[in-house]
Image (cartoon, grey):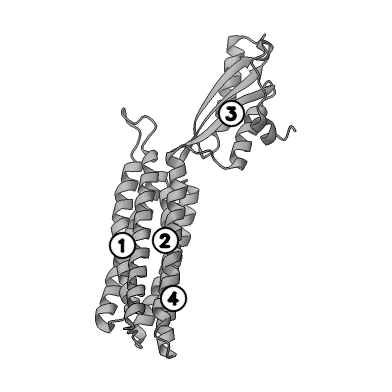
Amino acid sequence: MSRRATLRRVGLLVLGVNLALMLLKGGVWAMTGSFAVQSEAVNSAADTAYSLVIVAGLYLTTRPPDFEHPHGHERIEPFVSLFVAAGIFLAGGVVLWQAGSALLSGDVTVTRGPAAISVLVLSAVTKYGLYRYCLAAGRQRNSPALVATATDNRNDILTAGAALVGVVGALLGFPLADPLAALVVAVGILYTGVEVVRDNVAYLVGAAPPEDLRKEILKRALSHPQVQGAHDVIAHYVGPEIDVSLHIEVEGALTLREAHDIETAVIKSVQELPEVDDVFVHVDPKELGEWKADDEVERLADLE
């Protein structure tokens, strides 16, 4: 299945599941009046809202290249992820406010009925399945939006677990366990929102990829038998993909066609990395002495 079809299918699945959970939790909340289930219903409402944004965003990012966007639309994805982060902050803030209000007022009502326990267990199990599915699809298809969605689903497991602790605490005679657990989880949710923002801001500002990937890029460039050195190796994110530029050193006596063939071979080798989009290679005759010391290249190539 193509990247476009996979991302759109996952986005629609996440939207459908979140909508179903919101309706189910809302019904149980109306029936039981449980504070824990109410918080989870609000959380699912926020999930449904940002899922709509994800579906729309993934539709845009998976459109094919056109005249105005010759490299495609994947660079929209980090912005979609920031909307996911906004949903995470909203959910965390709502849970924090509700739990704090309950603690300050001392008015905590947690149902003892089985419906609340059942819906919270179902929510945790469902969200775990979504977490694993979105994480696998996001990593396989190099989609920061799906990875961010997986992170949010992981947090939803924690919120459902905290709500479940509150219900069980009430059964054991400790109703304040509900808002106390919710406070702890709310902090964790907000921290995850910070993580999502940090990761996707790196995509937007053109940060360097991980060191192991930069090392692999250099290794592939130097693996060509006629490449005798490399310098000015720059790899940076452009959206979720990576652009690479580098200078390679070759024998100056080569013909233009031979130098061109070397350049093409290096470009093809580096572009075979799934994370890499464009590769720009400048060929330098080594006799001109344009080579310059590049500590980063030497460190990555283990030449020191």
Q: Is residue 226 above or below residue 48?
A: above
Q: Position of residue 166 (x, y in %)?
A: 41, 81
Residue displayed at 47% across by 56% down: 135
Q: Which residue is mark 2?
A: 190
Number of the label disc, if any, that sits on residue 46: 1
Number of the label disc, if any, that sits on residue 225: none
How packed mark 2 is, by other alpha carbons closer than 10 Å (few <14, some 14-19, many 20 or more), is many
Give the CA separation, mark 1 to mark 4. 20 Å
Q: Quadrant of the C terminus?
A: top right
Q: Which residue is mark 4?
A: 181
Tag in front: 3 or 4: 4
Tag in front: 2 or 3: 2
Indicate which disc, 2 or 4, sits on the residue closer to the N terminus.
4
Q: Which residue is mark 3?
A: 233
Residue displayed at 44% across by 80% down: 165
Give the CA separation, mark 2 to mark 3. 37 Å
Indicate which disc, 2 or 1, sits on the residue closer to the N terminus.
1
Q: Nearer the viewer, residue 95 or 211?
A: 95
Label 3: element kind: strand
